[in-house]
Amino acid sequence: MKTVLSTLLLFIGISLFAQKQAPFQLIELPYPTNAFGPVISSQTIELHHGKHLKGYVDNLNKLVAGTAYENMSLEEIVASSEGALFNNAGQTLNHNLYFTQLSPNARNVPEGPLADAINKQWGSFSKFKEAFLKACGGVFGSGWVWLAKDKNGDLQIVPEANAGNPITKGMTPLMGLDVWEHAYYIDYQNRRADHLNSIWNVIDWSVVEKRY
Ligand code: MN
């Protein structure tokens, strides 16, 4: 009887250990995958979120397991790591910011203090957009372009290669566009600029303002 009981307790212990939640979870999308019509197809969203982002999250969990990084926030890991860990943590953070700034009911223009700061820095929202798209065009290969707030509270357009995030430069990322081919190739093939022009229709500036 004693043996049966201790065996049972051992199994309960093992299963609790096995079920210990990984430190990082794939975010749930706050909209259905077909929310964006022709701007971003449901196939692109399904692959981008369910395969690409899931892959980064799974790799990140494997890389942090049993290390000091296990108890750090995503932002702390991105700011303090390099190599494969930086790449997977960076891409997890980048995509969390990317997917949550999109909405089928997007308010397409900033308001309030962020709108004032954009107008002060670039003259108008349309001039800011023009400068941002120019920066996107300047990224050779895979990467991101960010609107970020620097240490002085000023806004900057920050192009980054691969998994880059302006957190590594002491800045706060506010809005980021993914210029990796996986973000648009099914819908736009080689027409990256067309994708980058149309995505502004689904960027919700009410989300971006909260990050400012
Ligand atoms: Mn991506």
Image: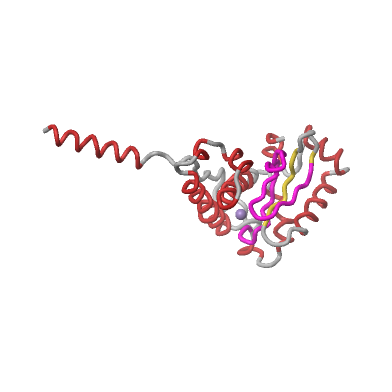
Residue for point 48% across, 40% down: 23
Q: Colour scheme of this structure image?
A: secondary structure
The image position of residue 152, as x and y in percent, is 79, 33
Question: How many circles with numbers are drawn on the protein?
Answer: 0
**Residue depicted at 65% across the width and 67% down the height:** 189
Residue span colored magenta? 156-183
Image check: 114 left or right of 123?
Answer: left
Residue 92 rendering spot, x and y as whole percentages: 57, 47
Residue closest to the far bottom: 190
Q: Residue at x 72, y 56 (%)?
A: 196
Foreground pick, 61 / 124: 61
Quarter holding residue 52: bottom right
Q: Quadrant of ligand 1?
A: bottom right
Residue 123, image x, y percentages: 88, 43
In this rendered view, identify the residue nearer to me: 138 or 61: 61
Outermost left residue: 1
**Can you say which quadrant of the picture contains the C terminus?**
top right
For the residue pair 83 and 167, the one nearer the viewer reads as 83
Q: Is residue 164 magenta?
A: yes
The picture places residue 38, in percent across and down from the top left corner, at 64, 58
Quarter-of-image position of residue 182: bottom right
* Location of the N terminus (image quadrant): top left
Rendering quarter of residue 179: bottom right
**Residue at the image position 59 percent from the left and 48 percent from the top:** 86
- Residue 64: say if magenta: no
- Left or right of residue 64: residue 139: right
With 119 as the anchor, is 94 left or right in this view?
left
